[in-house]
Image: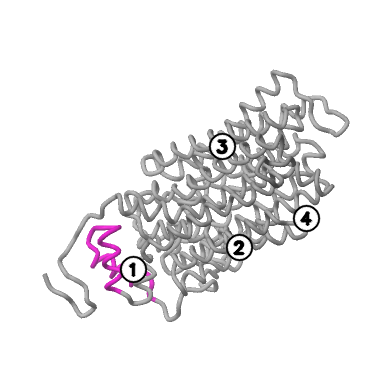
Amino acid sequence: MTTDNDGLLRGESEVAPTGSALFVSIAAALGGFLFGYDTAVINGTTGALEKQWGIGSVETGIVVSSALLGCAVGAWFAGTLANKIGRPKVMMIAAVVFFITSLGSALATGPVDLTIWRIVGGFAIGAASVIAPAYIAEISPAHLRGRLGSLQQFAIVLGIFGALIVNYGIQASAGGASGEVPWGGTAWRWMFAAAAIPAFVYFMFSLNIPESPRYLVAKQQLDKARKVLLKYVGGNVDHKIIEIQGTLDSDHPPRISDVRGSRLGLMPIVWVGILLSMFQQFVGINVIFYYSTSLWQSVGFSESDAFLTSVINSVVNIAGTILAIYLVDRIGRKKLLLMGSALMFIALGTMAVIFASSPVDADNNPVLSDAAGVTALIAANVFVFGFAFTWGPVVWVLLGEMFPNRIRASALGVAAAAQWISNWLITVTFPELAQTGLFLAYGLYALFALISFIFVWKMVRETKGIELEDMEDLERHGLPT
């Protein structure tokens, strides 16, 4: 065995242990857990915040959605920052910021400072949302990349489930989210404070994972890159380093301006990523997780039953995501997206019809019969399941792998920023749409599900089993057909 001038051992080829790649992927995906936790923790506090501070639907929408604006900013800059200081360091910064803002939210004295804390916390969530899929894609063997990339969404749904369980337990001990817990303090404040725990865990995991091999090659740290590739990716690492160097060949470090192109100012492949991100949110999935507790209360469920219903939604979400992990590398990304769009359209359309055909009370909330209530609950869970095994994880997988190496972090940042802005638009408009009529909100989301089917069918190309170094073809050939 010999060593070349770059310090690379020649002639060695090794298959990476699956367990090593799995560990670092789980560690990176914990950033998704923070997003999921934050998504669900606000769900349990909305009613209490309205009651304690006397805020209306517009103010509630702003408080709930404020973190998403911070997420968009964090996502936009995370790729550039990660290209400068490395992936794990960005994860550590995100963990520290989220830890501090969780405690700040718990101590908020009014809607203004709570909104500020949530915006700053959003910086961390947005950054983590970009780094995790990029890092997992860059450190995973091609045959495992879809399943490992799906761990980002799995962490999100576990975060949602964890927060709902914590919220349910805290509100049960206090007799409601606005009550006092036995150990002192208001229940909703402890819901926010508990988010500091997963932030600390995320920080500790980030301390113990290696740098991305593609970042190391870009920084000419070839010895380190080779060791990481041998341990986590396997195969002919000398050849892989040469491929990475070829795709990273550029006269300047990666930056946001690299995604500029001929289609309305951006590369065609970047537009595909942006539209995937937008449709993932425009189907209204986060309405279920931000507002489900208050939604089910508005149609006649008790507060305790509404919390329990939200937990059931979360269990369905987890089950669907597990199915996605099993299927994504077997049947491919595109087929799953098409299946999900069709199933979500049917479920959302069913909910829209139920709400449109039900009588309303003085507050314009639909009054559901027992049969209509059961049907709406089933349709909501079918919608969650349809999203969970398709659009939820698959979009993150695609965003992590579809862009060429030289623009991956930057392009992912742009696409993720679009996702957070879309999430914000849906979240901030739902309270007003719901006051006009729930049938209008869910009818609109059903329409977006239908459009998403057409978009995937026409514009998205399958990436299953393709090496990251071969993704250059997607850019070279423009918009997929």
Residue type at numbered disc 2: Phe
Q: Could you tell me which residue is drawn at 68 percent across and 30 percent down? A: 304
Between discs 2 and 4, the one toward the N terminus: 4
State the CA–CA distance, disc 4 to disc 3: 27 Å
Q: Could you tell me which residue is drawn at 23 percent across and 67 percent down? A: 238
Q: Nearer the viewer, mark 4 or mark 3?
A: 4
Q: Nearer the viewer, mark 2 or mark 1?
A: 2
Task: Identify the disc placed on residue 314.
Answer: 3
- State the residue lying farthest toward the left: 1
Q: Secondary structure at mark 4?
A: helix
- Identify the residue position indicated by label 4 in the image: 111
- Identify the residue position indicated by label 1 in the image: 244
Between discs 1 and 4, the one toward the N terminus: 4
State the CA–CA distance, disc 3 to disc 1: 39 Å
Q: Nearer the viewer, mark 3 or mark 1?
A: 3
State the CA–CA distance, disc 1 to disc 4: 48 Å
